[in-house]
Amino acid sequence: MSPAAPDPKMLSSMDSEHLSPYRSDGKLYGFVCIVTGATQPIGRAITMELAAHGAACVYACSTTSQDQPDDLPNTINPVHPNTKIVPYPLNPAAEEDTLTLIDEVLNTWGRLDVWVSSCGLLGSPTLETTAPSDLRKCFEANAMAPFFALKYAPPAMAKTTPRGTYPNAAPKEVEYGSIVVVSSVASTYGGCWGPCFTMTSHAALGVVRAGVTSLKGSNVRINCISPGQIDIGLSLDDMDLARTQLPPNPASLQSQKLQREHIALGRSGLPQEVGKVAGFLASGFSSYITGANLVVDGGATTMNPLSVPI
């Protein structure tokens, strides 16, 4: 006896009740997004991915005006001409800067839909060389920035708007939003780098977990991405890592031989692979996911939890 075919009316009802306001095809039409750390390889990849999903606007934020991603519009617009890329100088760990950015977004677009916090700081690789000031800087970059996103983005995400007249426009008829915190596998493991990085990466994941309860009933989701070893074009060969006591030395993990030994997929990841996960978490494909920590490390933490490459 063959199973009965699903009722089209039931499928339509499920789509409208549970995937709405998100599109079931994952598109972000009408969405206004903020990405911090947009000058870094992972931030750039996330910005590109949100544009590929059809976002109306992405504020590509960087720490200083001298470090603005002015080339991002020239890179993205030929491929995704309907997404407006706005280079924006921002200190994401500064409360006043965060509030100013949100005011500008609401005054210009009337809505905010996605906030990706992707800036981070490694800090010193050893306890002996770590000063309290180093720890404070890492907390500001790795945990305070996500905290400000959690605290101030949801009220802006509650704003609804009619359909605009700009490209990729779509109405926002109900409250919703997605906050994505890009941390590291150091959010759950020790020994990935120095104490500053491990402690503050744990704190970043703590922001996400605390946010689930804080955002209950708001229709704003918050999730974490914890990348492992991602090839961002930075060599560790010239860094003084002899006293890190990490098994093995992080610089040696950039060799293809050790990557094949320590990473299940046999290679380091690409920024675009992290970007695709951020696009997933921003879109309707993840409409029932909040409080998750998606580990993007090629299986390294599962295989070798005591020798996790960053």
Image (cartoon, helix red, strand yellow):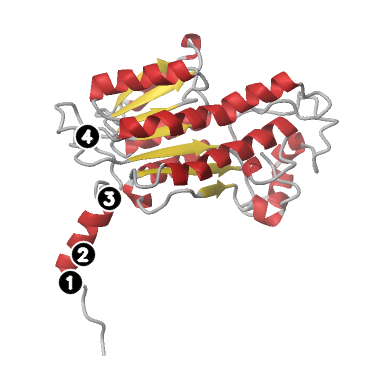
- Hey, which quadrant is residue 128 in on the image? top right
Residue sitting at x 38%, y 31%: 153
Determine which residue is flagged by label 4: 160
Q: Mark on residue 11? A: 2
Foreground: disc 3 or disc 1: 1
Residue 233 is at least partly visible in this image: yes
> Decide: marks 1, 2 in contact (CB < 8 A)?
yes
Amino acid type, mark 2: Leu
Q: Earlier in the sequence, mark 1 or mark 4?
A: 1
Residue sitting at x 42%, y 38%: 179
- Hey, which quadrant is residue 27 in on the image? top left
Q: Residue 213: image x %, image y %? A: 46, 46
| Local crowd size for mark 2, using a 10 Å CA cut-off: few (<14), some (14–19), many (≥20) | few
Nearest the viewer among 152 and 258 is 152
Q: Is residue 299 left or right of residue 179?
A: right
Residue 87 is at least partly visible in this image: no
